[in-house]
Image: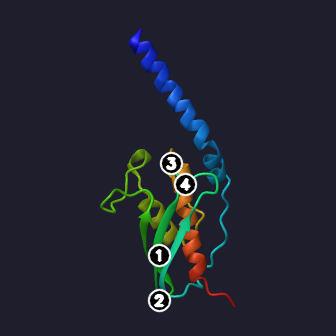
């Protein structure tokens, strides 16, 4: 009987958690990304962040280094990192660093997200986009 009660309480907690996080999940799922011209980036250090309007469970913040017009480094200040700043493993052993490396190679935000961590991936890409928009040279 105690086991049944514990299982019911765990299931109820999981359902409540999903319902509470649902607006944030929908917000991130529907994020779109601007076209960044990687040929027009100013050298410097830029901070970008994503803050949810519905919830702050997946808020992210990144620091971007642009050197000689090239995206040279991305550091997660808040997000999928542990207390020491090391990238956390996501589904399939991938990390957000893998996504950032793909962005640097392809010079585009149109990269594959980590399957099973789509929302985490998209919130970090949005923070990266916000930093790159600051670096963008507008003519």
Image vertical order of residue 36 relative to residue 3, above or below: below
> Pointer 4: what residue?
56
- Secondary structure under tag 3 reads loop
- Secondary structure under tag 1 reads strand
Lower position in the chain sequence, tag 4 or tag 2: 4
On-image quarter of the N terminus? top left
User: Marks 2 and 1: CB-CB under 8 Å?
Assistant: no
Farthest residue toward the bottom? 139
User: Marks 4 and 3: CB-CB under 8 Å?
Assistant: no
User: Marks 4 and 2: CB-CB under 8 Å?
Assistant: no
Where is residue 41 drawn, in percent x and y?
56, 84
On-image quarter of the C terminus? bottom right
Say the numbered circle drawn on residue 68: 2
Give the class, few, some or many, for how many residues have Cα within 10 Å of label 2's Cα (few <14, many ≥20). Answer: few
Farthest residue toward the left? 84
For marks 4 and 3, give the CA distance. Answer: 17 Å
Say the numbered circle drawn on residue 107: none
> Pointer 3: what residue?
117
> Pointer 1: what residue?
64
Q: Nearer the viewer, mark 4 or mark 2?
A: 4
Q: Nearer the viewer, mark 4 or mark 1?
A: 4
Q: Is residue 36 visible?
A: yes
Identify which residue is drawn at 44% across, 45% down. 91
Q: Nearer the viewer, mark 2 or mark 1?
A: 1
Image vertical order of residue 128 relative to residue 89, above or below: below
């Amino acid at each position: 009987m105690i086991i049944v009660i514990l299982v019911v309480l765990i299931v109820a907690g999981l359902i409540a958690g999903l319902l509470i996080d649902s607006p944030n999940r929908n917000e991130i799922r529907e994020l779109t990304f601007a076209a960044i011209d990687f040929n027009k980036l100013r050298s410097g250090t830029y901070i970008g962040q994503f803050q949810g309007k519905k919830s702050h469970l997946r808020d992210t913040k990144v620091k971007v280094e642009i050197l000689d017009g090239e995206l040279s480094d991305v550091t997660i200040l808040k997000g999928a990192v542990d207390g020491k700043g090391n990238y956390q493993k996501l589904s399939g052993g991938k990390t957000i660093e893998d996504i950032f490396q793909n962005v640097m190679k392809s010079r585009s935000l149109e990269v594959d997200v980590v399957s099973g961590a789509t929302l985490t991936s998209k919130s970090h890409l949005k923070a990266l986009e916000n930093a790159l928009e600051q670096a963008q040279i507008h003519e």
